[in-house]
Amino acid sequence: MDIRQTKQWGKYLAGIGWLVEEVGGIQVFIKKIPIFNSSVIKIQHHKNPLPFTMIDKLAKKYNAICVIAEPENKRLNLEDFKKAGYFNSPMLLTHTSTIYIDLTQSEKKLWNSLSENARRNIKKAQKNNLIIKKVWTKDGNYEDRFKLFFKLFKNLTKLKKFWTPGFDEYFKKLKAFEKCSILFFAYTKNSPEPIATIWVSYFNNIAVYINTGITEDGYGHLANYLLVWEAFKTCKKLGVKTFDFEGIYDPRFPKEKKTWVNFSEFKKRFHGTLIEYPKPQMKCYNLFFKLFFLCSKVLSRS
């Protein structure tokens, strides 16, 4: 199951203003647009087939302008989407590609499956005598630790020059996943302040790499490599079968998420299996918006 189809994700989106409905076992998210007395609907990384008639009824109920569906690749038949009035969406709402790491293999095989570069950098980080600490949010009293995480995360956004929502939105996400999240922190031997962090959530035999944060010192000590390796080992002990890196840059969509290129190269150094999702599908229920999206689709090719 993709994280966007979990009850926790539904709780998170409900906390930031989305309506959540379940249709045929699929989680559907509705965002109202009061000024137009309408809405937009998104369905992300859902299982196939999509119950098209039920989705049409939901779209009518909420006076939806459009539905954007981002299906998984199993049991996919794009002809079914076409017959139901969908076309390739000019908009991408979530990642279209990721990497899965197989945690069912032995630790030795897992280690050997990493790139030579990743293994070398993990060994260097270990020689730097970094201290790794874990915060299990299910134990409670984690707000101060999460503030530390967010401080490192915001530092990363400044270093890499990309925008993200504020603390409140991220804290609502953590609250939704508090029963199944771990915050990993890396410290140098003589420093009380962490130099790098990652946030991992786990459910249904899957662990997901949510976010990371780091300082220049963290990069210098290669703490990001050691943190990921420690996350692999911890999740493996929990019985997790698959580690989902939660998104990498997808060359099929070169104009989208260009800032992902560098950290995607970092994730690829842990090897694993490349997962590519199909192109998102859109159905418009408003003629004006349908013409707008179709025109934007044509113009994006020029």
Image: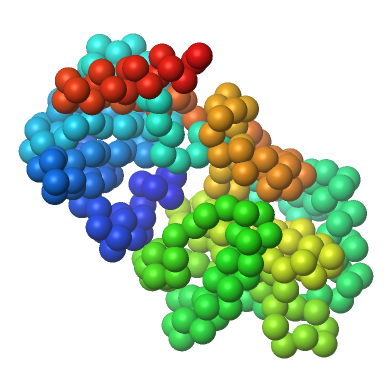
How far across and how far down the image is residue 8, in percent?
35, 59
Question: Going 16% across and 25% down the picture, which residue do you hit?
Answer: 286
Question: Going 43% across and 44% down the picture, which residue do you hit?
Answer: 1
**Residue 210 visible to an observer of this rendering:** yes
Tell me if 210 is positioned left or right of 231 in this view.
Answer: left
**Residue 11 visible to an observer of this rendering:** no
How far across and how far down the image is residue 187, in percent?
75, 78
The one of 75 and 197 positioned closer to us in this rendering:
197
Relative vertical location of residue 3 with respect to residue 302 in this rendering, above or below: below
Question: Going 46% across and 86% down the picture, which residue do you hit?
Answer: 141
Tell me if 172 is positioned left or right of 291 in this view.
Answer: right
Relative vertical location of residue 140 with respect to residue 67 in this rendering, above or below: below
How far across and how far down the image is residue 118, in percent?
82, 51
**Numbered disc total:** 0
Tell me if 204 is positioned left or right of 228 in this view.
Answer: left
The one of 152 and 240 positioned closer to us in this rendering:
152
Relative vertical location of residue 48 with respect to residue 156 in this rendering, above or below: above
How far across and how far down the image is residue 63, in percent?
11, 36
Residue 207 picture quarter: bottom right
Residue 71 picture quarter: top left
Residue 94 picture quarter: top left
Question: Going 50% across and 39% down the picture, which residue do you hit?
Answer: 95
